[in-house]
Each structure stands twice: as structure tokens, then as C-alpha cells.
């Protein structure tokens, strides 16, 4: 399922654009303004920046880890300006997310009208549930067909959208949770013990470099458990039911690269690192349970041209740029550099 055809060549465009227009509609109606804080490991920031760009009642501040996004991902955020401000943080994605969450609970900032556009906001998840349903409606041969979805997973918002669709009645046989080397969730499935990864591991599937997914608490809750903000499980969910619905697996960097090469050598199709993680995860699922001819869909979450260095090194091709990525190099970038320090971030927000 190619989810890379939106204005920033990312799966997050679909939900972000709908969410931005929802917010703008109600803010105008109520004559209010809002400041959106968003942490990104790559794709969220560019999608949110584009979706909220130019909306009159909304200002956006995006934080990204300085060394863990590609040049093109960064430029999609830093070249828009107007109501979009960007912070380059000396830290990891989890640090960016932690600062955003601290700001939300800081009453000194209540007057700023803060909200989020990350997948911690339910407004991001509801539209994402729709493309699972759409895919099934296009591919199923009968209403009795079940479907397997392989979902490259970092912060687990995309998976959560799928789980919502399943709860609404979509006949999903299994969700394959495919992570990169940040394997805290596959380990939890296999061992029953959840431990965050600090700091997160830097992989070429950069948008999935998350050591503690925000949506893990939602998933635990959906299956009857309770997880606190720091990742401690207060009450265990129904693990049997969790495993019945999902198959979690970690994919190495070598396996990711091999999947990209195999897909091109065999089918002349160029996939990017996140989609490659999903594809390899699907193969591992079938190696584990056997392939009985299920309808199966792997999600491709970004355009290969966002990762030119990796793609070129693996298959010797520089992917053709979609229109959404052209002319980025000629635009002026603007950003603020901050250290991983909440007091500095708070001062930045108060001085806006």
C-alpha cells in the first residue's frame, strides 16, 4: 500500500491534512487560536508543517533530533516559514517528545493554548483507520476474506489506526508489527517484560527510531492493561489476546538493506527503508506460521527519494524526485538550535 503520494511524500499527509482542517474549522468558529507542538523523527514534522502551513488560527512549533533526519526531511520543515517554526534539538526523538509532553503538563504555559499533532492526538489516528478499510474494500474478493497487514512501527500511531479499524469490524487476521533494531515491543511480546530503550538506536529507517512509543500505552489499555507515562506496566493486558491479534518482530539493518535489494532485483520496484522493514517482517511472519494464501498488505510509509544516500548505496540508483520534493534545495532554511533542556525550551515558547 503506497502511502507516499501526498504533498510531503509520507503516509502522515493523509491524517495531518484532515486534522489541520478540522482544527482550523473549529478554531475559526470559536474565534480561538492554538499553538501546536510536535516532535518528529522525520516524516511527522514535514507532514504537519505542510498540512498546517498558512492556517490563520494555528501556529506550529516542530522539534526534531539534529542528526537523525535526512536533509530532505529537514528541508520540508525548515523552508516553509510563516506560521511554522522549527527547533533542531541536540538529542534523540524521545528527548523531543519528552519536552513536548512536559510543556503540555506545565501550567505556566496554559495561556498559549497548546495542543499536539503527533499520534498522541486521537485526531491523527481516526483518519488513519480509514486507509486500512479502503485497502480491504479494494482487494477483498468476498466479505468472508480476512486480511494481514504488515505495519512498519516506530511510535505505533499507524498500527493504532489499524487496531481502531479492527475494533470497528474490519476482518483483520493479524497485524505484523515490524520494528527496526529498537525492539522493545517485540521483546515484550516474546518475554512479557517491557523495557524502554534509552537512548534509541539510530537506524536507516529513521522515523522508527523510537525507544518508547507513545501509543504503546493506548495498545496496552485497549487490551485491558495500564501503562504509565514512563513505560511501567501497572496492570498487565491480556497478552494472549494481544498475541492473537499481533505478531511482533524486529528487523536488522542488514535485513532491511537486503529487502530493498531483493525487491529491486526481483521486481524492479524501489522501496524505502521503512517499507523494507515491513516487507521483511511479513516474510518472518509467514516463515513462523506458514503461508496459506492470505490476502496480505505491507504498508510503504515514505517515498524512496527521501532516502537517496541509502537507496543509492544499496541498488546504485538515485530515486526520481516526486514533485513534492523538487526545488527544496533552492529554498531558504530557518531553524532554532536548542540543547536538550526543558528550561531553554520553555523560555523559547514564552518569548514567542
Image (tube, rainbow, N blue to C red):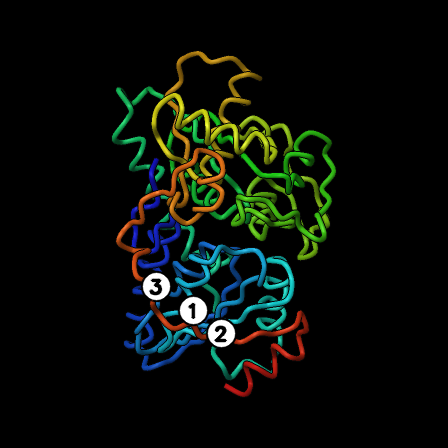
Q: Position of residue 313 (x, y in %)?
A: 49, 39
* Res 335 label: 2
Residue visible at 60% across and 50% down? 210
First in sequence, mark 3 or 1: give its number: 3
* Mark 2–mark 1 distance (CA, rounded to whole Å): 6 Å
> Along the line of sight, which residue is nearer the eye, 293 or 272?
272
Mark-to-mark CA distance, 3 and 1: 11 Å
Q: Give the structural element (helix, strand or loop) at label 3.
A: helix
Determine contact: label 2, label 1, CB under 8 Å: yes
The N terminus appears in which quarter of the rendering?
top left
Dot placed on the residue nearer the N-terminal end, 2 or 1: 1
Front of the two marks 3 and 1: 1
How packed mark 2 is, by other alpha carbons closer than 10 Å (few <14, some 14-19, many 20 or more), is some
Total labels drawn: 3
Q: Residue 127's x, y, as percent?
A: 35, 50
Task: Provide the residue designation for mark 3.
Answer: 50
Q: Residue furthest front?
A: 316
Q: Nearer the viewer, residue 239 or 14?
A: 14
Residue 254 horizontal side relative to residue 10, left or right: right
Picture coordinates of residue 177, whole percent (x, y): 54, 34
| Mark number displayed over residue 78 | 1
Give percent across and percent down for residue 116. Answer: 48, 65
Describe the element under mark 1 as helix, strand or loop. Answer: helix
Amino acid at each position: 500500500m503506497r502511502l507516499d503520494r501526498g504533498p510531503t511524500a509520507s503516509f502522515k499527509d493523509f491524517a495531518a491534512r484532515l486534522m489541520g482542517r478540522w482544527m482550523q474549522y473549529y478554531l475559526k468558529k470559536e474565534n480561538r487560536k492554538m499553538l501546536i507542538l510536535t516532535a518528529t523523527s522525520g516524516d511527522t514534522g514535514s507532514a504537519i508543517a505542510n498540512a498546517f502551513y498558512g492556517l490563520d488560527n494555528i501556529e506550529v512549533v516542530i522539534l526534531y533530533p539534529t542528526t537523525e533526519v535526512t536533509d530532505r526531511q529537514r528541508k520540508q520543515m525548515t523552508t516553509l516559514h510563516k506560521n511554522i517554526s522549527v527547533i533542531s534539538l541536540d538529542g534523540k526523538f524521545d528527548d523531543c517528545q519528552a519536552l513536548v509532553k512536559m510543556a503540555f503538563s506545565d501550567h505556566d504555559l496554559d495561556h498559549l493554548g497548546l495542543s499536539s499533532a503527533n499520534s498522541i492526538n486521537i485526531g491523527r489516528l481516526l483518519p488513519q483507520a480509514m486507509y486500512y478499510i479502503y485497502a480491504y474494500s479494494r482487494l477483498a474478493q468476498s466479505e468472508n476474506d480476512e486480511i494481514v497487514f504488515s505495519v512498519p512501527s516506530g511510535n505505533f500511531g499507524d498500527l493504532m489506526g489499524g487496531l481502531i479499524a479492527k475494533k470497528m469490524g474490519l476482518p483483520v487476521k493479524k497485524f505484523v508489527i515490524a520494528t527496526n533494531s529498537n525492539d522493545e515491543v517485540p521483546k515484550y511480546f516474546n518475554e512479557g517484560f517491557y523495557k524502554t530503550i534509552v537512548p534509541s538506536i539510530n537506524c536507516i529507517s529513521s522515523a522508527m527510531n523510537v525507544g518508547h512509543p507513545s501509543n504503546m500505552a493506548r495498545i496496552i489499555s485497549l487490551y485491558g492493561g495500564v501503562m504509565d507515562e514512563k513505560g511501567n506496566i501497572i496492570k498487565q493486558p491480556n497478552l494472549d489476546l494481544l498475541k492473537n491479534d499481533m505478531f511482533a518482530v524486529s528487523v536488522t539493518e542488514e535485513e532491511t538493506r537486503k529487502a530493498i535489494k531483493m525487491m529491486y532485483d526481483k521486481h524492479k520496484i524501489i522501496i524505502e527503508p521503512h517499507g523494507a522493514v515491513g516487507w521483511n517482517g511479513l516474510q518472518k511472519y509467514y516463515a513462523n506460521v506458514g503461508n496459506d494464501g492470505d490476502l496480505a498488505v505491507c504498508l510503504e510509509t515514505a517515498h524512496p527519494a527521501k532516502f537517496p544516500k541509502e537507496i543509492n548505496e544499496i541498488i546504485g540508483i538515485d530515486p526520481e524526485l516526486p514533485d513534492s520534493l523538487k526545488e527544496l534545495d533552492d529554498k531558504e532554511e530557518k531553524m532554532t538550535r536548542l540543547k536538550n533542556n526543558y528550561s531553554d525550551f520553555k523560555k523559547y515558547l514564552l518569548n514567542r
